[in-house]
Image: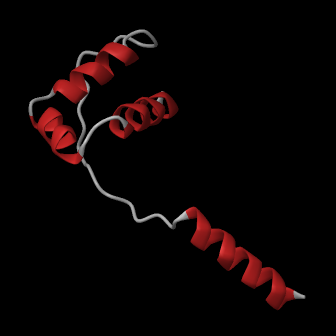
Amino acid sequence: MRNNIAMFLAKTIKKMAYDEIINDLITHKLQSLMRENLNKIYPLKVCEIRYLGIEAREKPQEAKAEAKEEQKQNL
């Protein structure tokens, strides 16, 4: 169930701008969409989001460059 929540939120949030995400979160539109999706798996009375955070991720090019450097150092 948690995997389904993560996949649903990832798909939904990728399509939205930051302002839209915050607005939908405050007005509970995002939670209602999530509840509708999860009701197909297991009936839920309430579906809430407690925390919304931003994760810092490395850019793919930087990660590849670092991996190549580590490989060179290991040889």
Find residue 56 and report its image quarter: bottom left
In the displayed image of the protein, which residue is found farthest to the right? Answer: 75
What residue lies at 36% left-to-right and 31% top-to-bottom? 12
- Quarter of the image with the C terminus is bottom right
The foreground one among 33 and 45 is 33
Q: Is residue 1 above or below residue 72?
A: above
The foreground one among 35 and 21 is 21
Q: Is residue 65 above or below residue 52?
A: below
Find residue 5 and report its image quarter: top left
Looking at the picture, the colour scheme in use is secondary structure
Tell me if 15 is positioned left or right of 71 in this view.
Answer: left
Tell me if 60 is positioned left or right of 68 in this view.
Answer: left
The foreground one among 69 and 30 is 69
The foreground one among 8 and 65 is 65
Tell me if 39 is positioned left or right of 70 in this view.
Answer: left
In the displayed image of the protein, which residue is found farthest to the front? Answer: 61
Q: Position of residue 1 (x, y in %)?
A: 48, 27
Q: Position of residue 31 (x, y in %)?
A: 23, 27
What residue lies at 80% left-to-right and 90% top-to-bottom? 73
Q: Position of residue 20 (x, y in %)?
A: 18, 38
Q: Is residue 38 above or below residue 54?
A: above
Find residue 23 and report its image quarter: top left
Q: Report how many numbered discs are placed on residues in the image.
A: 0
Q: Position of residue 62 (x, y in %)?
A: 58, 73
What residue lies at 10% left-to-right and 37% top-to-bottom? 26
Tell me if 25 is positioned left or right of 75 in this view.
Answer: left
Q: Is residue 67 above or below residue 1?
A: below
What residue lies at 51% left-to-right and 33% top-to-bottom? 3
